[in-house]
Image: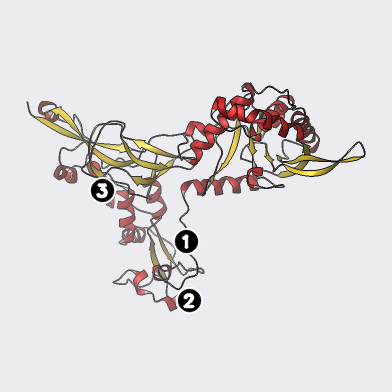
């Protein structure tokens, strides 16, 4: 019996509950490459983390649908793989695989998937008033892709559909033979003529006389510009969204306390070399800080909560989100059930998550479930900061730089190692009294360290 192949779409996986789309960072395979199951096809950028996309099947990559830098919704096809190996008798069975044409010629003519629309295609069509019945699909089985919608809009198809729908009278400009972007000189920005510019990045067709004009391509390429543009990555966009959401939805309040950590400095200097020989990692002050914070949360569990409009949800597990800075972003991997770990265990978690973050190897499971955030701003010399709460948590604390200062003790001046702890709080949940007591407990825990404190 002869063998035939089968074409299968590879779609964006459902990586996490809150993620609805992903951006292709870079394709690591090209059309014509043979891929084994679980071989990495491409890099995916999401709002939370960057990850690698493994191939769910074995076969030959025959077509890339979503290119580098483009975004696809969860469940949307990003490439087509030709699987080897079903019998000719099976292939000849009518409707056995309606979504999988057998060759490139049949792929163009097959319309078995003509009526299957991804959420991104439906949304784009609705935004632009596009009748999907009028759009020719270039995807597998005649499926309509986002590029098909964008091309349809750019060629005036959306305007033709809108013209068939009764609307309020408007002053419609005469059609032009060339695209408007090429017909408008740079000095005609303030002209009275309406402007029709196809925006390729979103697929939206503008018909207006905008007050703020789009930057023209020739200006971007000019050597006389004194600036350069940086594309906003999905992670940076997610950071911007969360920070804006935090400061607009959460009524922030802020307080600070000063702590004498002289005994902690002595303790760490005593055990750090032995810890390095035993564990192979550096024992940082942050591990001691996390232990002090976790023990204080046990005494004041309301700190470990979130606002839920008509109720306050207090979390049982103490999962510490750890702010880790990279060259282009700040990530918050989570130490799960931090209250069940000793100082050495926390140090190992800190080292592992920090290395994974800076190597770009964080998994989505490393990023979810945080209930309280600790930020080690002292690592880059800060002595005072006003942190923004990691939405939707109730509070965040920063551990600033340890500085030697003259301090009055029993009416005498002594040089002590001092550090500031800065706490931002959600004033819907927390008030000054409870947060003051919480910080005092953290202070007591830090100042209780001595040369005999056990780290295991």
Q: Residue at x 47, y 61 (%)?
A: 229
Q: Is residue 222 above or below residue 4?
A: below
> Residue 387 at what x, y percent from top left?
67, 45
Is residue 8 visible in this depiction of the protein? yes
Residue to which mark 3 is pinned: 137
Q: Earlier in the sequence, mark 1 or mark 3?
A: 3
> Residue 70 at what x, y percent from top left?
37, 49
Q: Earlier in the sequence, mark 3 or mark 2?
A: 3
Circle 3 sits in a helix, a strand or a loop, which is it?
Answer: loop
Tell me the number on the disc at residue 229.
1
Write down the quadrant of residue 256 in the picture.
top right
Circle 2 sits in a helix, a strand or a loop, which is it?
Answer: loop
> Residue 101 at what x, y percent from top left?
18, 38
Is residue 337 visible in this depiction of the protein? no
Q: Nearer the viewer, residue 396 or 223?
A: 223
Q: What is the distance, in whole Å, between disc 2 and disc 1 at their CAs?
A: 25 Å
Q: Residue at x 38, y 56 (%)?
A: 203
Asked if the residue at tag 3 contacts the one at tag 1, i.e. Cβ–Cβ closer than 8 Å, the answer is no
Q: Nearer the viewer, residue 27 or 404?
A: 404
Q: Earlier in the sequence, mark 2 or mark 1?
A: 2
Residue to which mark 2 is pinned: 190
Please tell me whether mark 2 or mark 1 is closer to you in this view.
1
């Amino acid at each position: 019996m002869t063998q035939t192949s089968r074409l299968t779409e590879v779609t964006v996986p459902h990586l996490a509950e809150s993620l609805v789309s992903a951006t292709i960072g870079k394709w690591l395979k090209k059309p014509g490459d043979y891929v084994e199951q679980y071989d990495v096809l491409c890099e995916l950028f999401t709002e939370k983390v960057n990850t690698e996309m493994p191939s769910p099947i074995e076969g030959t990559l025959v077509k890339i649908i979503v290119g580098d830098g483009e975004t696809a919704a969860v469940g949307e096809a990003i490439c087509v793989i030709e699987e080897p190996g079903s019998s000719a008798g099976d292939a000849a069975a009518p409707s056995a695989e309606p979504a999988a044409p057998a060759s490139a010629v049949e792929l163009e003519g097959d319309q078995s998937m003509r009526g299957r629309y991804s959420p991104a295609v439906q949304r784009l069509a609705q935004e632009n008033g596009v009748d999907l019945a009028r759009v020719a699909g270039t995807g597998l089985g005649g499926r309509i892709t986002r590029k098909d919608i964008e091309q349809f809009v750019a060629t005036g198809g959306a305007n033709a559909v809108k013209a068939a729908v009764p609307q309020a009278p408007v002053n419609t400009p005469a059609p032009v033979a060339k695209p408007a972007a090429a017909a408008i000189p740079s000095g005609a920005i303030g002209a009275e003529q309406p402007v029709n510019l196809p925006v390729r990045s979103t697929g939206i067709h503008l018909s207006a006389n905008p007050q703020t004009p789009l930057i023209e391509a020739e200006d971007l390429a000019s050597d006389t510009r004194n600036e350069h543009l940086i594309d906003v990555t999905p992670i940076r966009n997610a950071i911007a969204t969360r920070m804006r959401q935090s400061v607009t939805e959460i009524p922030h309040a802020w307080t600070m306390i000063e702590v004498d950590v002289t005994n902690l400095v002595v303790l760490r200097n005593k055990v750090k070399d032995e810890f390095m020989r035993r564990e192979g990692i550096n024992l940082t002050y942050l591990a001691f800080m996390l232990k002090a914070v976790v023990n204080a949360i046990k005494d004041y569990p309301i700190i470990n909560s979130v606002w839920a409009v008509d109720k306050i949800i207090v979390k049982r597990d103490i999962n510490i989100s750890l702010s880790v800075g990279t060259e282009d972003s700040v990530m918050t991997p989570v130490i799960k059930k931090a209250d069940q770990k000793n100082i050495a265990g926390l140090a190992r978690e800190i080292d592992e998550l920090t290395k994974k973050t800076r190597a770009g190897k964080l998994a989505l499971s490393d990023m979810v479930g945080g209930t309280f955030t600790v930020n080690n701003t002292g690592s880059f010399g800060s002595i005072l900061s006003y942190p923004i709460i990691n939405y939707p948590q109730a509070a965040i604390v920063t551990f600033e730089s340890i500085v030697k200062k003259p301090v009055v003790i029993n009416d005498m001046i002594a040089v002590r190692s001092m550090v500031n702890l800065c706490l931002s709080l959600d004033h819907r949940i927390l008030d000054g009294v409870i947060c003051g007591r919480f910080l005092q407990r953290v202070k007591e825990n830090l100042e209780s360290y001595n040369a005999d404190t056990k780290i295991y």
